Structure formats: structure tokens, C-alpha cells
Amino acid sequence: MTLASTKLVPELQYYFENFIRFSIINKSQIPAPVTIEETYIPQESFIELLFNDDYPYTSYKYHYTESSSRSTIPLEYLDRIMLYPASGKYMELDDIGENLFLLQSNDLTMLDALLSYRVDSTSLTMIDTTGTISFDSTSVILYADFDSFTTSLSKLIYLYLDLKIRDNTLNYNNTSLVSSGDLLSSCYEAYVLDEFYKIISARGI
């Protein structure tokens, strides 16, 4: 088996593990990751923005830098990356580091829209516009349509917002996964699917 990465991003493991443990539809089908303590989880991570319904901040960060000294890495994290001593890396949230998850412009547009929704769930308006993707942060209007997105993450955020704001489930009414197999979008799709299940089951369908 070839490992996709030996980089540890603690907040991804932390928030996904929390989701898995309380997921309605998972029923232990996806094994929960090892528990990571909240003590050293950074603030304002875009990963928390994705998974935390009660995200408390008005901005987010998505750049990462490899820890320059293993002596400063929390012991529980150091134990994990030392499973792969030659390649293991501990990644810290930073203002000017690397775009570790290779977020594209569509992803950032949708993260901005999601942030507005997290700050005030009644503020965001969605308007269907074929071939156009833009977010007006002043009027808090998202102009987009599902088929215009080119990345899995941006599609999933759109589906989530469309569900929450317009109660629309039609764009996700199939058996094909949206995620392309990368770790982040695969984890987030499980979260989005759980949200769809909650709303559809409440309808008595």
C-alpha cells in the first residue's frame, strides 16, 4: 500500500473524528480516527469552518507551514508522525504558508459564502446564474449554479448551502459521489451527506 501523505494536520483529524462519532448515518461504517485532544487545535482554520456548525470566527485561514522543530510539537502528535520518521511532518496553520490542500478560486469563493452563512445563517442569498460563480460580500449574495463548479470541495459547499438556505435536495439526488477521492473532499462529503439525511428524513420520506 502506498501512503498518500504522512503529513499530520491535527484539526482535520479532530473535526472529522468528532463528526464521525456523532454521525447519524455512519453507523460505524467509517472507522473513527484516533482521538486528538482539543488543546492544541488552532483557531480560524478553514477546516473548522467546514465542519463546525457553530464556527465562532469572522475569518478563516488555509495556509500551512511545516513545524521547524520537533521539540515544539505536542507529544501526542510527535508520537504519530514518528511512525514515519523519515517523511512524517506536522503542519501548522499559518498566515503566509503553503496552500497545502491546493484550494482553487472556486473553493475560496464558496468558503467565503460559507463563512457568511456561519456568521449569520439568515444573511446569505443564493441566485442561480449559469456559467458564473461569484460572491458579493457587501450584499451577501452568491451567484452560482452547481454545474459551473470545477472542484469537488466547491460543489459540496454549494450543495450544503443550497440545502440549508433553500431546502433543495435535487442536485444531490443520485448515487454518484461528488468527491474525487482526495482526503479533504471525501471527509466533507460524509458530513454533507449526513446533513442531507437529517433533512430528508425529517420530511418523512
Image (spheres, rainbow, N blue to C red):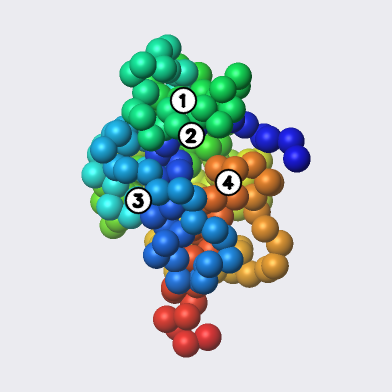
Instruction: Name the residue beneath numbered marker 3.
Output: 52
Picture residue at 49% right of the left edge, 77% below the top: 200
The answer to whether mark 4 and mark 1 are in CB contact below 8 A is: no
Image disc number at residue 80: 2
Instruction: Name the residue beneath numbered marker 4.
Output: 185
Q: Is residue 160 left or right of residue 61?
A: right
Picture residue at 49% right of the left edge, 65% below the top: 194
Q: Find residue 54 and report its horizontal and vertical position in percent.
A: 28, 52
Q: Secondary structure at mark 2?
A: helix
163 versus 130 height, above or below: below
Look at the image and tell me whether residue 83 can be seen: yes
Question: In 3D space, how far apart are the residues under numbered discs 4 and 2 (Cα atoms)?
Answer: 23 Å
Label 4 neighbourhood size at 10 Å, few (<14), some (14-19), many (20+)? many
Label 1 neighbourhood size at 10 Å, few (<14), some (14-19), many (20+)? many
Q: Find residue 30 and report its horizontal and vertical position in percent.
A: 57, 60
Q: Earlier in the sequence, mark 2 or mark 3?
A: 3
Instruction: Name the residue beneath numbered marker 1.
Output: 90
Q: Secondary structure at mark 3?
A: loop
Label 2 neighbourhood size at 10 Å, few (<14), some (14-19), many (20+)? some
Q: Nearer the viewer, residue 102 or 83?
A: 83
Question: In 3D space, how far apart are the residues under numbered discs 3 and 1 (Cα atoms)?
Answer: 22 Å
Q: Secondary structure at mark 4?
A: helix
